[in-house]
Image: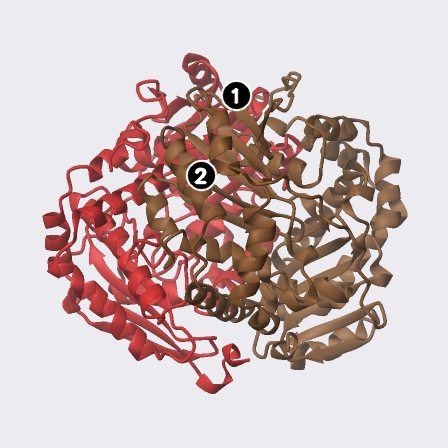
Chain colours: A brown, B red
């Protein structure tokens, strides 16, 4: 005998754990104790990312992040040392931050952190290692760009911005050639070794001396200066437009629609993200229901905001069967227009509210998930109760808020559509959509 | 290096129950509260597929999200997403896995949704649903295999590693032709043959009392009858080496030459598998591994993969495959890279140091423990150990299997199995080496 669908009781209220905060030397330790979590996540956050790079040093942050893995003895010596402790190096350079760290068993946290600290503060940075890493990065750039979705994604910056954002975060295969070992050493001394930063620690901290760990990592480094923020200039040229990156013989097209969005600090996240969830942020979102579940054009489609300190981007991305490319573009535009015209349904509003509130225990059920949230708070200077404020914002959000966000933040007529696919097959149908002029380019010409 | 984390405090707190219909339930405590990770391992994978019906177990996994007797198309995803939960599924040669992590108060709903599609999927199945998901899966195949460089490597490897007609000869994704040929009757009969509570391990990781979880599972699943007939697995026994070197040379539009090597080794769970797992770690896992040190750092022949050049594909019911994969740097030919890799493989027979073995153990142990460090990963590992080996506690004790493997074992394993006779090679070379982008 089967049961009927159970009625759920009220969810247990969730409050994001209040972190412990210690000032140690020139830095700050921010920690969350998770009893029973034997694998700790440790992250050092420094507020300097790719956005602050001068145009003749593009990619220096990424290359420095890679070169730190060569350790204090050079020659890729860091990872083998960490491996002995069951620890793993973590490095993530974004436009707004330089994050390094280790994941380590809590009973090895002291040893792993000591290895991590010397690698970050006093690495060898030998010229031959830096050059090897640089050449490898450049070759990997081309390898990665041979995947259609990566190629399309890396093209967004140059279509929307001039200046630093026009070149990929890693500097791309051409500009990275200009970054010398001396430039890396200089960047490291000023922005990494010399800046204490903030140390995030998450795990079972019962037997962990946070002050000692802080002293090990910060030593005598000075407090990190606040990053300078300068609004980037937009790209020139007519919008909307379609750019085809020719990939002859492709059986699928990687498809992106992208346009500018405001900087992170100017966006009301529950309203913007809630609207984005309805359009393409969930499996059951409109775009996925249409392009995947009704039309069968794709394995999946999504959208999101990529928000930074000084600017932002909104993008829809998917990979569709080649002959359906043009119709996929019009179908995406149709869904955007419908959302702007008709707003959201009661069911969609409820889904946005519920998924972003009752699901918080799931979002933060891992040490890495909690650490990522703390890193975000540090980078964007958010209050300790940021997650709880977001939850409250989602609880308050209305259908009108989401409709307003759709009308104000979605700008299809100011978009570029980027298609990595077979131009011979796609150019004419894309032109016939009437969306805008169609330009075809050889992908290899993009970064010269 | 032993005992990085000997336990996460949960050993001995695993609960095991078997319902009258054969469903095996395992419970375990979560390290973080307020969540329930629900994980189902059905004992059916692509090894049950017969020629002409490849890709079916995986296509079927998609169909399980398309509605059942009391759940509309898309409603399962919708219900879990509304709870902010994580939800997905995957299919391999040996099992089909469905999982969701939900806030604890929603455990009953997750169990009900799973029970409904187990008991009544056939009531929700239509030709329209089948046609749509067939298109989705074909696009998944394009995205993962056909439209990416080296995308067909895996199916080429299986083709060389297992003889024609063998259940592991084809990849789980299947062929376009077979996907096109899938019909509704076969969908319905597949569910009947493979989807029964007697073929299911259900794992729940949460802070709830195990008896309480048992009661709830009994409520939702207890009324579902076991299968009337148990599907017979195709014969996957296989003795001896590959009969190599078996080779597949591919010239197509790839950005650089790539070398894929495979060696047939013991089945997952056998001592030989554990030894060869450590061999693969000495050779190519982590930046202290031989392939990384020699070919990436010292000789500059291979692209930096961070230390992920070797691993073993774990097949439970037939010999597994130890795989080695590297991509050539600019100016390095496929021949040169292949010879360099084979030289490092051959070097294992000359001896391995205690330090190398300790490092290899530490790397494998780290990866294992990281997989247990979140509720979803713990539930999945327990499901695996229970479905494949009948012992959920193995999830916690697995690293002990590596403790008494010696350097002599490593050398003996390498000498016996890493031979030309047991070798398959899949090579990709660019159509026109001069057009590679790396020169820019």
Mark 2 vs mark 1, CA separation in Å: 21 Å
Nearer to us in this view, A354 or B403: B403
Residues packed near mark 1 inside 10 Å, few (<14), some (14 to 19) or many (20 plus): some
> In the picture shown, does residue A192 fall above or below A259?
above
The residue drawn where x is 38% and y is 57% is: A74
Could you tell whether A232 is left or right of B40 in the image? right
Residue at far front of view: A220
Percent position of residue A62, x then y: 56, 58
Q: Which residue is mark 2?
A: A103
Q: Position of residue B410 (x, y in %)?
A: 15, 51
Query: Chain letter of disc 2?
Result: A
Which mark identifies residue B33? 1
Between A90 and B404, the residue placed more toward the observer is A90
Please tell me whether mark 2 or mark 1 is closer to you in this view.
2
Indicate the position of residue B262 as horizontal and vertical percent values: 26, 63
Q: Secondary structure at mark 2?
A: strand
């Amino acid at each position: 005998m089967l049961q009927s669908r159970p009625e759920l009781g009220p969810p247990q209220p969730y409050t994001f754990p209040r972190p412990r905060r210690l000032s140690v030397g020139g830095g700050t330790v921010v920690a969350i104790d998770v009893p029973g979590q034997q694998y700790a996540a440790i992250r050092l956050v420094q507020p300097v990312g790719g956005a602050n790079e001068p145009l003749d040093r593009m990619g220096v942050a990424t290359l420095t992040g890679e070169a730190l893995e060569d350790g204090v003895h050079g020659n890729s010596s860091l990872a083998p040392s960490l491996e002995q402790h069951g620890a793993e190096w973590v490095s993530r350079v974004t436009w707004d931050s330089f994050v390094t760290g280790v994941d380590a068993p809590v009973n090895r946290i002291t040893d792993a952190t000591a290895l991590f600290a010397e690698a970050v503060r006093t690495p060898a940075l030998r010229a031959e290692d830096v050059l090897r890493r640089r050449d490898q990065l450049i070759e990997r750039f081309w390898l990665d760009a041979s995947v259609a979705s990566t190629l399309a994604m890396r093209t967004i910056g140059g279509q929307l911005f001039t200046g630093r954002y026009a070149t990929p975060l890693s500097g791309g295969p051409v500009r990275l050639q200009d970054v010398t070992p001396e430039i890396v050493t200089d960047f490291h001394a000023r922005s990494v070794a010399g800046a204490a930063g903030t140390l995030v620690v998450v795990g079972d901290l019962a037997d962990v001396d946070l002050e000692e760990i802080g002293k090990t990592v910060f030593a005598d480094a000075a407090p990190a200066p606040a990053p300078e923020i300068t609004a980037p200039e937009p790209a020139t040229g007519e919008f909307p437009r379609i750019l085809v990156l020719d990939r002859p013989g492709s059986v699928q097209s990687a498809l992106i629609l992208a346009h500018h969005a405001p900087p992170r600090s100017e966006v009301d996240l529950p309203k913007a993200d809630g609207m984005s969830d309805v359009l393409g942020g969930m499996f059951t979102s409109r775009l996925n229901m249409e392009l995947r579940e009704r039309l069968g054009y794709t394995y999946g489609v999504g959208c999101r905001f990529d928000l930074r300190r000084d600017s932002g981007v909104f993008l829809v991305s998917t990979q569709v069967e080649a002959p359906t490319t043009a119709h996929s573009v019009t179908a995406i535009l149709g869904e955007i227009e419908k959302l702007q015209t008709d707003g959201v349904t009661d069911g969609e509003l409820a889904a946005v509210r519920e998924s972003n509130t009752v699901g918080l225990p799931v979002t933060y059920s891992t040490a890495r998930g909690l650490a990522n949230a703390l890193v975000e708070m540090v980078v964007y200077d958010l209050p300790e109760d940021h997650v709880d404020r977001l939850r409250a914002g989602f609880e308050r959000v209305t259908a009108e808020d989401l409709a307003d966000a759709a009308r104000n933040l979605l700008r299809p007529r100011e978009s570029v559509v980027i298609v990595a696919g077979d131009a011979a097959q796609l150019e004419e149908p894309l032109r016939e959509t009437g969306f805008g002029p169609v330009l075809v380019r050889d992908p290899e010409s993009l970064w010269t | 290096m032993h005992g990085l984390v000997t336990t996460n405090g949960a050993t001995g707190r695993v609960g095991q129950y078997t319902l009258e219909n054969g469903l095996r339930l395992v419970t375990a405590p979560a390290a973080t509260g307020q969540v329930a990770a629900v994980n189902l391992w059905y004992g059916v994978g692509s090894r049950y597929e017969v020629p002409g019906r490849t890709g079916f177990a995986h296509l079927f996994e998609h169909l399980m999200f398309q509605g059942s007797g009391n759940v509309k198309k898309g409603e399962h995803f919708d219900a879990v997403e509304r709870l902010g939960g994580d939800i997905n599924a995957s299919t391999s040669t040996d099992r089909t896995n469905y999982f969701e992590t939900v806030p604890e108060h929603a455990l009953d709903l997750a169990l009900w949704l799973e029970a409904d599609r187990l008991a009544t999927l056939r009531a929700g199945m239509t030709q329209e649903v089948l046609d749509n998901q067939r298109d989705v899966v074909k696009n998944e195949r394009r995205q993962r295999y056909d439209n990416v460089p080296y995308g067909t490597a895996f199916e080429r490897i299986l083709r060389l590693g297992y003889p024609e007609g063998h259940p592991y000869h084809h990849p789980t994704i299947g062929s376009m032709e077979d996907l096109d040929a899938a019909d509704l009757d076969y969908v319905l009969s597949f569910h009947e043959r493979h989807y029964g509570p007697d073929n299911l391990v259900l794992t729940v990781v949460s802070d709830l009392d195990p008896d309480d979880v048992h009661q709830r599972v009994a409520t939702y699943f207890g009324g579902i009858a076991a299968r009337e007939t148990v599907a017979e697995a195709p014969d996957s026994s296989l003795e001896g080496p590959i009969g190599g070197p078996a080779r597949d040379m591919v010239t197509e539009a790839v950005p650089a030459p790539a070398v894929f090597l495979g060696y047939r080794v013991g089945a997952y769970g056998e001592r030989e598998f554990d030894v060869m797992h450590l061999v693969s770690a000495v050779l190519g896992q982590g930046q202290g591994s031989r392939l990384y040190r020699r070919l990436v750092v010292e000789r500059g022949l291979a692209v930096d993969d961070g230390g992920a050049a070797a691993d073993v594909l774990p097949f439970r019911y037939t010999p597994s495959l130890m795989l080695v994969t590297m991509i050539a740097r600019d100016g390095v030919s496929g021949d040169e890279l292949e010879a360099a890799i084979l030289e490092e493989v051959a070097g294992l027979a000359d001896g391995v140091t205690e330090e190398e073995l300790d490092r290899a153990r530490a790397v494998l142990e780290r990866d294992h423990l990281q997989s247990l460090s979140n509720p979803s990963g713990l539930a999945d590992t327990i499901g695996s150990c229970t479905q494949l080996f009948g012992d959920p506690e193995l999830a916690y004790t697995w690293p002990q299997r590596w403790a008494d493997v010696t350097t002599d074992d490593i050398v003996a394993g390498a000498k016996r199995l890493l031979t030309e006779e047991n070798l398959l090679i899949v090579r990709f070379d660019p159509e026109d080496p001069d057009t590679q982008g790396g020169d820019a």
